[in-house]
Amino acid sequence: MTTAQNVVQLVNDARTNAKTLEDRVSLLRGQMAGQSGSESQSDELRVAISELELAAVDVFTLFESRMQSHFKRGPFSRKLKAALIASGQADLADRVHNFYLAINVLKHGKGASYRELLGSSNPLFRVNSAEDISSEDGWTPAELIEICIPDFFDGLTVTLLEAYAFLEK
């Protein structure tokens, strides 16, 4: 199997894993029914959300590292966005860029990527204001972006597979 084939399989495997995590989050939230839940339920929910966050970061990072060879040195996502725009695929370029920003927020928290997402009208996923998040322990990067909805990970993986197809043509 070639490296290129591995990218498709790895993205699809990540999607399958994410679906399991999303189902677990949904089940736990349903069991808690808006209540704070038991300490073990709260802990299990935090773990599942953290695993989903890590899966999103991992699949995007894997995609970047495997596809980096399509560009000479420099920032992969910026070069991919420019190549997509130059080829008339502005919608895909916008989706790649927005998911790139979201992954940066998951990795680094509030910063330039977070501020850019807050300032944009982004229909791909919801960006939460840090001031609106009420948590005893403070906010976590996953709370800044709604990743616990099926559309987030599905959108991410569909975008990566479309970008892969563009790069491999």
Image (spheres, rainbow, N blue to C red):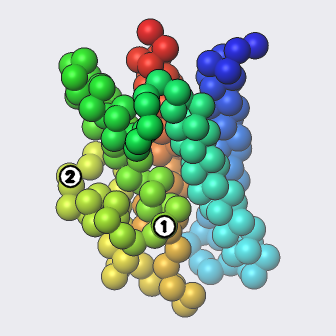
Q: Which residue is drawn at 52% across and 74% down?
A: 140
Amino acid on which the number 2 mark rests in the picture: Ser
Q: Which residue is drawn at 44% across and 9% down?
A: 169
Closer to the eye: label 1 or 2: 1
Disc 1 crowd rating (10 Å Cα; few below 14, some 14-19, many 20+) is: some
Q: Can residue 45 be seen in this view?
A: no
Q: Residue at x 57, y 44 (%)?
A: 61
Residue that numbered label 2 is attached to: 121
Q: Is residue 38 left or right of residue 125?
A: right
| Mark 1 vs 2, N-terminal side | 1
- Crowding at mark 2 (Cα within 10 Å: few <14, some 14-19, many 20+): few
Task: Give the residue pinned by disc 1.
Answer: 108
> x, y percentage for residue 6?
69, 23
Q: Which mark is residue 80?
A: none
Q: Which residue is found at the position 29% from the left and 58% from the top?
A: 117
Is 91 left, or right, of 139 in this rendering?
A: left
Q: Are marks 1 and 2 in contact (CB under 8 Å)?
A: no
Q: Is 101 rendered above or below residue 142?
A: above
Q: Is residue 80 above or below residue 17?
A: above
How many callouts does the rendering have? Answer: 2
- Label 1 SS: helix
User: Label 1, label 2: how many angstroms apart (C-alpha)?
Assistant: 21 Å
As rendered, which of 11 and 153 lies closer to the eye? Answer: 11
Most extreme residue toward the right is 40
- How far across and down, in percent of the image, does residue 105 sit? 44, 62
Which quarter of the rendered picture does the N terminus lie within?
top right
